[in-house]
Image (spheres, rainbow, N blue to C red):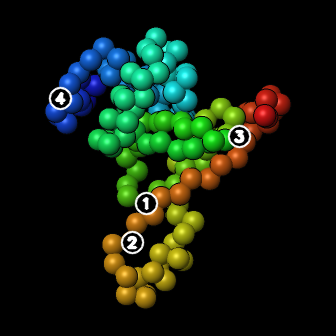
Amino acid sequence: MDTVNMLNEKKIKTTKYRIEILDFLIKEENRFISIDEIQEKVSSDFSTAYRALELFEENNFIYKTKIKEKFYYTYRCDEGKNHHHLICTECGLKIVLDFCPFETLEKKYYDLGFDSFYHSRDFFGVCQNCKDQNIID
């Protein structure tokens, strides 16, 4: 589905910057991106980019996480309800784990009579490429 149709489906007004920002995040779906990089890529001001990102997050197009006290954004992967990411704190690389490290806890949760268990967790570190390039902050 193209970006315009995605926005129209959610009844979101299409603007040049909204389309460019969402297209950019989809193109770069394997990493988390700072608002600074997004602004630079689409040549928008901060408030325009920020409002678009908040709107996209509210409509579940994107996912936001905090890395080193700054928010980063990525196109929301469709890997199911409970999934986890490994995120490089230097380049923003995003790897979706193909297993749940909390399966034992989830089983215990149900054993205790709870229902509708949901969790989301990110794991942060430095990827091999950043270590090899020695670009660690």
Q: Secondary structure at mark 4?
A: helix
Q: Secondary structure at mark 1?
A: loop
Q: Where residue 31 sits: x, y (%)? A: 55, 34
The earlier-in-sequence mark between 3 and 2 is 2
Q: Is residue 82 left or right of residue 133?
A: left
The earlier-in-sequence mark between 2 and 4 is 4
Which of the 4 image quarters holds residue 115?
A: bottom left
The earlier-in-sequence mark between 3 and 1 is 1
Which of the 4 image quarters holds residue 82?
A: bottom left
| Residue tagged 2 | 117
Q: Amino acid at mark 1?
A: Asn
| Residue tagged 1 | 82
Q: Where residue 88 sits: x, y (%)? A: 66, 40
Q: Which label sits in the foreground, 3 or 4?
A: 4
Q: Which label sits in the foreground, 4 or 1?
A: 4
Pick the quarter of the image with the C terminus.
top right
The earlier-in-sequence mark between 3 and 4 is 4
| Residue tagged 3 | 127
Work out whether residue 5 or residue 35 is closer to the camera in this orientation and state it.
35
Q: Where residue 13 sits: x, y (%)? A: 20, 25
